[in-house]
Amino acid sequence: MTASPNLHELRRRSTREALRQAALASFARKGFSNVTVTELAREAGVTERTFFRHFGSKEAVLFQDYETQVEWLAEALSRRPESEAIFDAVLAAVTSFPHDFEVVRQAASARMELISAERIAAHLRVVQASFAAVITRFVAERYAGTPQIDLLAEVAGATLAAALVTAVESWGRNGCAGDLNDITQTCVNLVRSGLAPLA
């Protein structure tokens, strides 16, 4: 009985990965705008309906690395010790994600090469809002009862989400050079310092 959900989850991940691989290969071969969802589904051996169960759009394939991290982040934050500072908790949660850096690198490279800056910006706003919501909830629950906690939590969530998204996109723009965890830590520490290097 307990093996069934695990098998289902493995199949779901396998299908999602097959779709992602088919999409990245097709985008590279034909160009992003020349590939349809119908073609992607056919190449992965699934229906269009199955494609849309995994990805809301073609563009969503290129942002899968973020979506997977958002799901992980809430769970990872819930396991951080109560005494840990927010900045440390967020960094520890993010760096505990079992990154497949090849997936992250492919997605970052494909975003830069295949879709316009405007489309990237539109999707990143959605991604950033998702990260912000998770962090906001975490801060609000951790410091429940603090005066103006709703406002404080929203500011913390929005600011830290911006730092996390900026880290990955900067890494991608620079050809995925350098250590992503180090870049993430630099971005979060810049916020922690009150933007001191810019003062």
Image: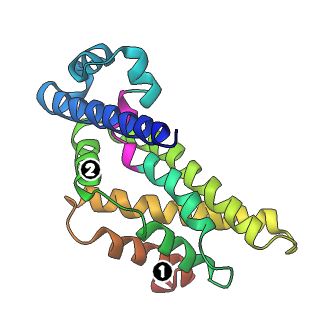
Residue 96: x percent and y percent? 43, 69
Looking at the image, residue 195 lies above or below residue 136: below
**Could you tell whether 148 is left or right of 138 in the image?**
right
Colouring: rainbow
Q: Is residue 81 left or right of residue 10?
A: right
55 or 126: nearer the eye? Answer: 55
Image position of 49 with respect to 53: above or below: above
Q: Secondary structure at mark 2?
A: helix
- Badge 1 crowding class, 10 Å Cα cut-off, few under 14, some 14 to 19, many 20 or more, is some
Q: Which residues are magenta?
A: 58-65
**Location of mark 1 (residue):** 189
Type of amino acid under label 1: Asn
* Label 2 or label 1, whichever comes before in sequence order: 2
Residue 172: x and y in percent read 27, 56
Which quarter of the figure has residue 80?
Answer: bottom right
Residue 118 in sight: no
Residue at point 68%, 80% (across, down): 82
Residue occupying the point 48% across, 66% down: 163
- Determine the main secondary structure of the stretch shown in magenta: helix
| Front-most of residues 17 and 167 | 17
Looking at the image, can residue 182 be seen?
yes
Answer left or right for 37 relative to 79: left
Q: Which residue is mark 2?
A: 103
**Whole-percent x, y for residue 185 in the image:** 41, 76
The amino acid sitting under disc 2 is Val
